[in-house]
Image (cartoon, rainbow, N blue to C red):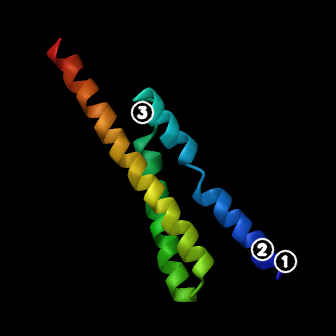
């Protein structure tokens, strides 16, 4: 029971770890400090964890990593939403 609790707390903390980055991107409308390669790599790892969670039939692994993947997808969207117009503006000057 204690290990399940520790796993659940760890899952909550890690699955919400990109919320501050998303909040900062929304507030500043900038993603210049975001590494797209890192976000893609983490997204792939999280997707593999979800697959593993289904194999193990472990709802904590599935839920935590699904939430992580959703936040990473939001961050990828913000990356392209905020970085592409800036690149186009620089090229137009």
Instruction: Note whether 18 is above or below 9 in the view shown.
Output: above
Q: Is residue 11 left or right of residue 76?
A: right
- Residue at the spot 60% in from the left edge and 83% down from the top edge: 58
Q: Gap between marks 2 and 1, in whole Å?
A: 5 Å
Label 3 crowding class (10 Å Cα cut-off): few <14, some 14-19, many 20+?
many
Give the Cα distance between marks 1 and 3. Answer: 39 Å
Q: Residues within 10 Å of mark 1 (few under 14, many from 20)?
A: few
Measured in 3D between alpha carbons, the distance from the residue under mark 2 to the one under mark 3, in whole angstroms, is 35 Å
Q: Are marks 1 and 3 in contact (CB under 8 Å)?
A: no
The quadrant the N terminus occupies is bottom right
Q: In the rendered view of the protein, which quadrant contains the C terminus?
A: top left
Left or right: 60 with respect to 48?
right
Question: Can you identify the residue that label 1 sits on?
Answer: 2
Asked whether, in this view, residue 20 is left or right of residue 72, the answer is: right
Q: Identify the element where label 3 is drawn.
A: loop
Q: Give neighbour class at mark 2: few <14, some 14-19, many 20+ (Cα, 10 Å).
A: few
Q: Residue at x 70, y 71 (%)?
A: 8
Q: Are marks 2 and 1 in contact (CB under 8 Å)?
A: yes
Image position, residue 36 (x, y; %): 40, 43
Q: Say the numbered circle drawn on residue 50.
A: none
Labels 1 and 3: the sequence-earlier one: 1
Upstream in sequence: badge 2 or badge 3: 2
- On the image, numbered disc 3 is attached to which residue? 31
Secondary element at tag 2: helix
Q: Which mark is residue 5?
A: 2
Residue 70, x across and y down, in percent: 44, 60
Quarter where residue 91 is shown: top left
Q: Residue at x 40, y 51 (%)?
A: 74
């Amino acid at each position: 029971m204690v290990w399940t609790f520790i796993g659940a707390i760890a899952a909550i903390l890690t699955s919400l770890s990109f919320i501050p980055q998303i909040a900062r991107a929304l507030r500043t409308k900038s993603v210049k400090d975001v590494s797209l390669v890192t976000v893609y790599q983490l997204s792939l790892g999280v997707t593999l964890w979800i697959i593993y969670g289904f194999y193990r039939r472990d709802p904590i692994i599935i839920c935590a990593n699904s939430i992580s993947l959703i936040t990473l997808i939001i961050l990828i969207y913000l990356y392209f939403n905020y970085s592409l117009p800036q690149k186009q503006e620089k090229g137009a000057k």
